[in-house]
Image: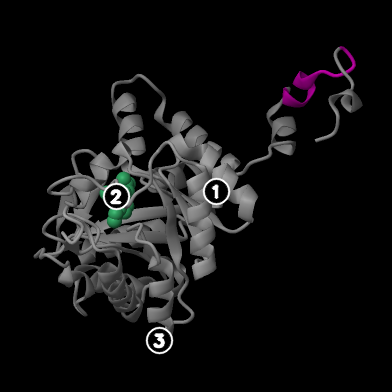
């Protein structure tokens, strides 16, 4: 930034001149929000013809693979470049073994969507265990330290297996969200060894232990059955730590790093983008969506203006793309 004195001052300078008309404003707009910046989350569950609405995420539902294909097709037709898939398995167990079945629910959905849409849509698979474990934690448990907690390194081996299984089903990108130390390295090695060296990793690098995930846990049936996730997800009070988390994931081979949630963490998005200059994703999470929807339903805010303002702000902070439950609505508004 130049010294302020180099710019002149009122009355020679009047900021309102360039705000006077829509065309003048468009000429100097610094941030663009387009459909190309959106990723639509989808929840898949077993069955066919199933559309099971999610109470806390109005407009979203758990979908069987055929209905997920339908939704994905609509997204692609609107120009949305990518979806991210979360699975609700038919059976949960201690180690989340359904997550790496060849015919697991996400694997089925990936195959269907890729068969129908091929290169017209990027399919991202969320890699984590909380949806698949009976206890709802993001890995296998141990009480070695005298208190129940997720066993980091035992979970790494299973994460590699899950990621390879999704890649084998045709996932274009895998996105580990469990905040295990070394998860990117473990997954990179497993993918490379299995012949999937071309599959990128979108790492949930700076993921906070946030109360904004509430509606998601209803959607994915993934609430922890005891305790919370604070021994692996980050303390909302920390930002230097987010920069370290991102640095580590980049060293381990992450292709894109994510900050999550988005709206309460715009400073973190900005710092990560400035520090590393790498592709940055932001997750406009379920609670952020639910707040907007609830206020809009009451008639207290204008949904469309608020959503566009929020997403533009996330882009302005430094996010290249945004995972958002508003994706279909925004794509229609921008069309
Ligand atoms: C964990 C995961 C979560 C979300 C995405 N992946 C929830 C959690 O950590 O409990 C939350 C997304 C949202 O709230 O929209 N696999």
Residue 245 location in percent, x, y? Answer: 47, 55
Instruction: Tell me: residue 32, above or below residue 299.
Output: below
Residue 55 location in percent, x, y? Answer: 18, 39
Residue 35 seen in the current view? no
The numbered mark at residue 40 is none
Of labels 3 and 2, the one closer to you: 2
Label 3 to label 2: alpha-carbon separation: 30 Å
Residue 255 location in percent, x, y? Answer: 52, 66
Q: Residue at x 39, y 56 (%)?
A: 75
What kind of element bears circle 1?
loop
The numbered mark at residue 193 is 3
Residue that mark 2 sits on:
231
Magenta residue span: 11-19
Q: Nearer the viewer, residue 278 or 59?
A: 278
Residue 222 location in percent, x, y? Answer: 19, 52
Q: Residue at x 54, y 67 (%)?
A: 251
């Amino acid at each position: 930034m130049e010294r302020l004195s180099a710019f002149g001052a009122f009355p020679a300078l009047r900021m309102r001149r360039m705000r006077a008309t829509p065309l003048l404003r468009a000429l100097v707009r610094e941030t663009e929000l387009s459909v190309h910046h959106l990723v639509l989350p989808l929840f898949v569950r077993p069955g066919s013809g199933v559309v099971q609405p999610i109470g806390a995420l109005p407009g979203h539902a758990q979908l069987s693979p055929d209905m997920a294909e339908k939704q994905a097709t609509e997204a692609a037709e609107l120009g949305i470049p990518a979806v991210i898939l979360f699975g609700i398995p038919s059976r949960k167990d201690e180690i989340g073994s359904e997550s790496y079945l060849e015919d697991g629910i996400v694997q089925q959905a990936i195959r269907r969507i890729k068969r129908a849409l091929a290169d017209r849509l990027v399919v991202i698979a969320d890699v984590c265990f909380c949806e698949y474990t009976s206890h709802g934690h993001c890995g296998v448990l141990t009480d070695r330290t005298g208190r129940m907690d997720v066993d980091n390194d035992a979970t790494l081996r299973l994460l590699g297996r899950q990621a390879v299984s999704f890649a084998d089903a045709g996932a274009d990108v895998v996105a580990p969200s469990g905040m295990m130390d070394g998860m990117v390295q473990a997954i990179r090695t497993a993918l490379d060894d299995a012949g999937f060296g071309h599959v990128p990793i979108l790492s949930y690098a700076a993921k906070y232990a946030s109360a904004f995930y509430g509606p998601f846990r209803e959607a994915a049936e993934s609430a922890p059955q005891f305790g919370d996730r604070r021994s692996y997800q980050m303390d909302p009070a920390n930002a230097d730590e987010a920069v370290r988390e991102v640095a580590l994931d980049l060293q381990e081979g992450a292709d894109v790093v994510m900050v999550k949630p988005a709206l309460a963490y715009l400073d973190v998005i900005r710092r990560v983008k400035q520090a590393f200059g790498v592709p940055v994703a932001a997750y406009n999470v379920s609670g952020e969506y639910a707040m907007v929807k609830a206020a809009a339903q009451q008639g207290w805010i204008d949904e469309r203006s608020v959503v566009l303002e929020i997403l533009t702000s996330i882009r302005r902070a430094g996010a290249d793309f945004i995972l958002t439950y508003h994706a279909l609505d925004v794509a229609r508004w921008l069309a």
